[in-house]
Amino acid sequence: MTNQSVWNKNWANWKEDFKPSPFAEKAFKLMKIKDMHDVLDLGCGKGRNSLYFAANGMNVTAMDISDEALKTVENLRHPKIRTVCADISKTDLELEKYDAVFACLSLHYFGDAVTRLIINRAHRSLRGGGLFFIRCKSVKDKAYGIGEKVGEDMYFDEWTRHFFRPEYMTDVLSGFETAAVSETEEDYFGVCHFVDGIAVKASS
Ligand SMILES: C[S@@+](CC[C@H](N)C(=O)[O-])C[C@H]1O[C@@H](n2cnc3c(N)ncnc32)[C@H](O)[C@@H]1O
């Protein structure tokens, strides 16, 4: 199965729930303080965070590999949301297009080189002073170690998961002017452990 069909199958069985992630709420507070308008929701899924950003006045580009998930976003017919179906490991992003890029649980599926490539693309797609928000599963998460080991902190079980350590997150964000990295936990179908990064691109 291709990566797209794996995700389509997953989303086809997923009940819609538009409650935003607390990480999106935290991100929006910072976007609002900085009077930002354009956000890319990278790996948006069924759009719980895209809808929240749009409802709060942001122009949202909602990007995902799954056309199945994007159908739900498109059915919202929200005038501030534009959908793009693309594989973020293979697609370049428009340069200096966004004030913020938000990637919630969507960048922990790739090996080291592709992870860095995508983060570099996110960096280039931000305007000077732009914000990058990234949340990935942590090595402390209950899913760590399940399935076949396919790389450092990477396991394959239905799909590949790359679990993050705070020092790894700090390293992959080193191209930004500043980056704050924290370990968080949240009840999302059971307690999950994350590593969050909030990074700022240097002003041009
Ligand atoms: C755990 S879901 C998170 C969805 C959403 N960000 C949220 O917080 O509800 C991961 C998402 O990443 C998307 N994804 C996985 N690999 C991708 C790729 N190569 N390109 C684009 N999206 C991808 C999946 O389709 C899925 O929607």
Image (cartoon, grey):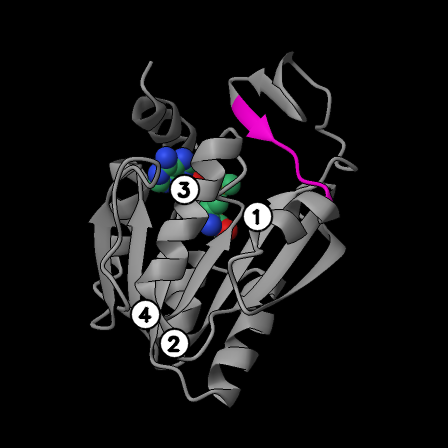
The quadrant in which the C terminus is found is bottom left
**x then y, percent, for residue 152:** 66, 23
Identify the residue under disc 1.
172
Task: Kindly report which numbered mark, 2 or 4, lies closer to the viewer in this rendering.
Answer: 2
What separation in Å lies between label 1 and label 3 (alpha carbons)? 10 Å
Which amino acid type is marked by label 2? Gly
Q: Amino acid at mark 4?
A: Tyr
Rendered view: 137 above or below 18 = above
Q: Nearer the viewer, mark 3 or mark 4?
A: 3
Q: Of label 3 and label 4, which has the lower sequence position?
A: 4
C-alpha separation, residue under disc 2 versus residue under disc 3: 19 Å
Q: Dot 2: what SS?
A: strand
Q: CA distance from mark 1 to mark 2?
A: 19 Å
- Please tell me how crowded label 4 is: few (under 14), some (14-19), or many (20+) other residues with Cα within 10 Å: many
Which mark is drawn over residue 117? 3
Q: Is residue 143 left or right of residue 11?
A: right
Gap between marks 2 and 4, in whole Å?
Answer: 9 Å
Callout 1 secondary element? helix
Residue 190, given in percent of the width and then of the height, sits at 73, 41
